[in-house]
Image: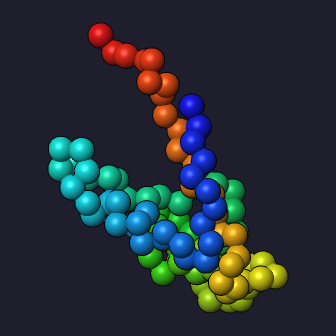
Amino acid sequence: MLSIKGGIRGTGRASYYLELASGDYYLRGGEPLGVWHGKGTKTLGLKGTVEKAAFHDLLLGFAPDKSGALVQNAGAEKRQSAWDLTFGAPKALSVP
């Protein structure tokens, strides 16, 4: 099942996502640190764990290496930066 919680504008809820890894999450195991994935990561020079500054720059539409804007409306307050998608099993699913 897919839930879409709406768009993230500007840096929106960036702090929420970045703080997940430091929270007391499910029996104090913590959420694992974010890791960059996808074909665009090589082009943008992103590898390893997600760093706060690079994440904020990308949400604002700027290159993480400060080389310039990636989109026409970079830095605009109402820019649509991302979508929050959550995948989960239906409530009817159970494990014996």
Percent position (x, y) of residue 9? 62, 72
Q: Which residue is situated farthest in the left direction here? A: 28
Residue 79's place in the image compared with 76, above or below, is above
Pinpoint residue 44: horizontal percent, then vertical percent: 66, 72
Residue 29 makes an appearance in the image = yes
Q: Give the position of the N terminus as an image quadrant.
A: top right
Residue located 41% across and 66% down the image: 16
Q: Evaluate whether residue 42 shows in this view.
A: no
Q: Quick one: 50 or 8, which is closer to the camera?
A: 8
Q: In this view, does 14 lie to the left or right of 42?
A: left
Quadrant for the C terminus in the image? top left
User: What's the residue at 47%, 58% (across, down)?
Assistant: 35
Q: Residue at image x 52%, y 65%?
A: 47
Q: Residue 68, located in which quarter of the rendered image?
A: bottom right
Q: In the depicted view, which residue is nearer to us: 63 or 5?
A: 5
Q: What is the quadrant of residue 63 in the picture?
A: bottom right
Q: x, y percentage for residue 73?
A: 77, 82
Which residue occupies 18% across, 44% down?
Answer: 27
